[in-house]
Image (tube, rainbow, N blue to C red):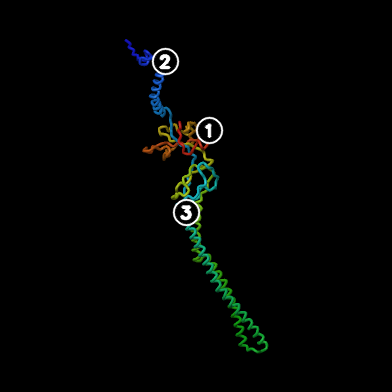
């Protein structure tokens, strides 16, 4: 026997606690709507959970990141960021200055070496001048002495012709004259040798060697200073700026990340090894961006084991899993860099 239960509202829909209600018919629709809404509210989370449970079983999905194959430019040594000439997204040409660093210790060392070299060169030149002056003075004395002897010799020659001078006295004058000529020649030779010795001293002497060592050290310091003015190695654009003006950096600290303009945009997918058969070279895949748009791509390089998962894809308290690193090349016109950002997480459907 079929038993039916009916509520009072079903028996008399136009009555509410004994009072007639004119809109009773409309309230019956409201009950039905509330029932469906309650049913939907209960089933909707179940449907979503079921979708996310079934989705990995139906599709082969891997997490990935967009890569412009960037390089990070590092500080060559401990320094302070003085200027950063470009911001994120800016383009630059090869040779343009990207970052200016400053090292006060290096500046002081360069200034000290320059002062020492100037002082040594001034001392060396003064020493050379004083040394040569001694031989110049000796040469002047020899010339003056020869001139006086020549004057006396001419007088004695005149006296000798007149027979007023003995042969012995005249011979003595001649001896003095020849000796004066010899002293003049010797003074000239000594001066030439002194100049030669001083030239050698300027080139291979102890002071010259010390100066040369200091100049070599100075050139090294100047080269280190030039390294602090970092220029662009190629035409490209700025991916990220890590160093801020006034920030003190240790050696080999990342300052700025850049990518070459001609570099191909790639997607790096991290696939579970059990799906290695779906990561074959040239296999077609679909890349889903965070905004929902999809791009066609293909596997462009042999698959390798990933050494490290990008920080964008790693989860806290989760150990390093063995994943395959799959490089993908996009097969269609690329969106703008504002839509396709370096390091942006994506989903890849194999």
The answer to whether one can see residue 302 in this image is: no
Residue that carries the numbered disc 2 in the rendered image? 22
Please tell me which of labels 2 and 3 falls first in the chain.
Answer: 2
Examine the rendered structure and indicate whether residue 108 appears above or below residue 197. above
Residue at 50% x, 47% y is 84
Residue 320: name its quadrant.
top left
Q: Please state the horizontal and vertical placement of residue 26, each as a whole percent of the image.
A: 42, 17
Above or below, 202 against 168 in this view is above
Which residue was labeled with disc 3?
103
Q: Nearer the viewer, residue 36 or 67?
A: 36
- Which quarter of the figure is the N terminus placed in? top left
Pointers 2 and 3 in contact (C-beta within 8 Å): no
Front of the two marks 1 and 2: 2
- The residue under the point 65% across, 89% down is 164
Q: Earlier in the sequence, mark 1 or mark 3?
A: 3
Residue positioned 40% across, 15% down in the render: 21
Where does the image place residue 3, in percent across and percent down from the top left?
32, 12
Q: Return the residue at label 1.
A: 332
Q: Earlier in the sequence, mark 1 or mark 2?
A: 2
């Amino acid at each position: 026997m079929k038993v039916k239960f009916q509520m009072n509202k079903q028996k008399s829909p136009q009555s509410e606690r004994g009072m007639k209600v004119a809109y009773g018919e409309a309230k019956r629709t409201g009950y039905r709507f509330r029932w469906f809404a309650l049913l939907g509210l209960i089933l909707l989370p179940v449907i979503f959970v079921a979708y996310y449970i079934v989705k990995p079983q139906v599709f082969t999905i891997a997490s990935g990141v967009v890569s412009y194959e960037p390089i990070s430019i590092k500080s060559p040594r401990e320094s302070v960021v003085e200027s950063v000439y470009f911001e994120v997204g800016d383009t630059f040409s090869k040779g343009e200055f990207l970052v200016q660093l400053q090292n006060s210790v290096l500046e002081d060392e360069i200034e000290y070496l320059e002062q020492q070299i100037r002082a040594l060169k001034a001392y060396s030149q003064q020493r050379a001048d004083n040394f040569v002056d001694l031989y110049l003075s000796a040469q002047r004395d020899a010339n003056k002495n020869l001139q006086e002897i020549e004057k006396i010799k001419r007088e004695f020659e005149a006296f000798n012709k007149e027979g007023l001078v003995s042969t012995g006295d005249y011979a003595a004058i001649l001896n003095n004259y020849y000796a004066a000529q010899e002293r003049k020649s010797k003074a000239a030779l000594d001066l030439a040798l002194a100049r030669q010795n001083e030239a050698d001293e300027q080139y291979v002497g102890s002071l010259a060697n010390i100066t040369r060592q200091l100049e070599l050290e100075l050139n090294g310091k100047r080269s280190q200073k030039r390294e602090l003015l970092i220029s662009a190695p190629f035409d490209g654009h700025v991916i990220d700026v890590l160093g801020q003006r006034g920030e003190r950096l240790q050696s080999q600290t990342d300052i700025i990340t850049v990518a070459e303009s001609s570099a191909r945009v790639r997607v790096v997918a991290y696939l579970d090894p059990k799906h290695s058969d779906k990561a074959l070279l040239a296999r077609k895949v679909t890349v889903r961006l965070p905004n929902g748009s999809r791009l066609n791509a293909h596997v462009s390089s042999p698959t390798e084991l990933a050494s490290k998962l990008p920080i964008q894809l790693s989860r806290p308290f989760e150990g390093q899993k063995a994943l395959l690193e799959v490089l993908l090349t996009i097969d269609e016109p690329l969106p703008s860099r504002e839509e396709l950002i370096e390091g942006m997480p994506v989903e890849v459907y194999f």
